[in-house]
Amino acid sequence: MLLIKICGITSLDMGLVAEKAGANMIGFVFAPSSRNVTPEQARDIACGLSPETKTVGVFVNESKNEIERIADLVKLDFIQLHGDETPAFANSLHRRVIKAFTIDEVTDEALATYPAEYLLIDSPGTTYRGGSGNTFDWERLMSRNIDKHKLMLAGGLNPDNVQEAIRVARPAGVDVSSGVETDGLKDAEKISRFVAAVRSAD
């Protein structure tokens, strides 16, 4: 079954909407972003979710001590590294790791050797790392040396294009944020449509 991660959750209400719709993962952003939350907010949201829903903390070039502090407070299941973190840094963490790369910058060597449970391939960022809301040409993944069992696809996905993205890229999971928003806020109807579209394609 394809993994579905709804990222940029800022309220328990939307976390529960995502959970009820069938999302597997909820993402909290602990980096500069219009969707960032405090560790305390994330902890309160996570406490209201089912243990079956995995929580992911998104960090950009944060210190190990701060990542571990937040991970322990929120009881994160995964740490998503969205900056310039080295393989050694990832190996030093005490949580499962998702490593994000942009399609323009990632090398085949990194895809083959980076120590992460999942490799998230995203569009190049604009104001912030990731979260540009733009797609990239998914065909570009065909020539890359990437284990499809570890591939999480991101970048401009929405309820209308995610089935085609899955058909082309054949990822293990998909990650969405702005694609399930209206006027910068999570939209319950779009979340439900997105999850339904993924499950239909699965």
Image (spheres, rainbow, N blue to C red):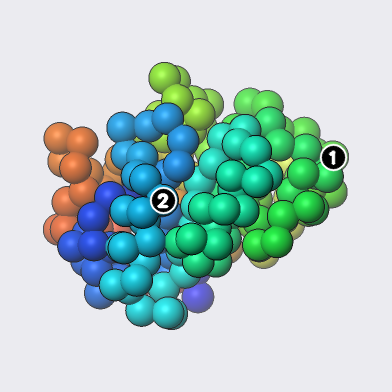
Q: At numbered mark 1, what does the secondary structure look like: helix, strand or loop? A: helix
Q: Residue at x 59, y 44 (%)?
A: 66
User: Looking at the rendered structure, which numbered label has been put on residue 109?
Assistant: 1
Within the image, what quadrant is residue 84 found in? top right
Q: Residue at x 46, y 61 (%)?
A: 74
Q: Quadrant of the C terminus?
A: bottom left
Q: Taking the image as drawn, is residue 56 in sight?
A: yes
**Front in this rendered view, residue 52 or 136:** 52
Q: At numbered mark 2, what does the secondary structure look like: helix, strand or loop? A: helix
Q: Taking the image as drawn, is residue 166 in sight?
A: no
Q: Residue at x 46, y 35 (%)?
A: 31
Query: Residue 164: image x %, image y %?
Result: 42, 51
Mark 2 residue type: Pro
The mark tally for this picture is 2
Residue occupying the far top of the picture: 127
Q: Is residue 15 above or below residue 85?
A: below
Left or right: residue 15 versus residue 131 is left
Left or right: residue 11 versus residue 89 is left
- Which residue bears the numbered disc 2? 39
- Specify which label sits upstream in the sequence, 1 or 2: 2
Q: Residue at x 20, y 36 (%)?
A: 184
Mark 1 residue type: Glu
Left or right: residue 190 versus residue 84 is left
Query: Residue 96: image x %, image y %?
Result: 66, 62
Query: Which class describes the residues within 10 Å of circle 2: few (<14), some (14-19), or many (20+)?
Result: some
Within the image, what quadrant is residue 59 found in? top right
Nearest-to-viewer mark from 1 and 2: 2
Q: Is residue 159 above or below residue 55?
A: above
Query: Residue 133: image x %, image y %?
Result: 37, 33
Q: Are marks 1 and 2 in contact (CB under 8 Å)?
A: no
Task: Give the distance between the C-alpha atoms of the residues marked 1 and 2, in whole angstroms.
Answer: 34 Å
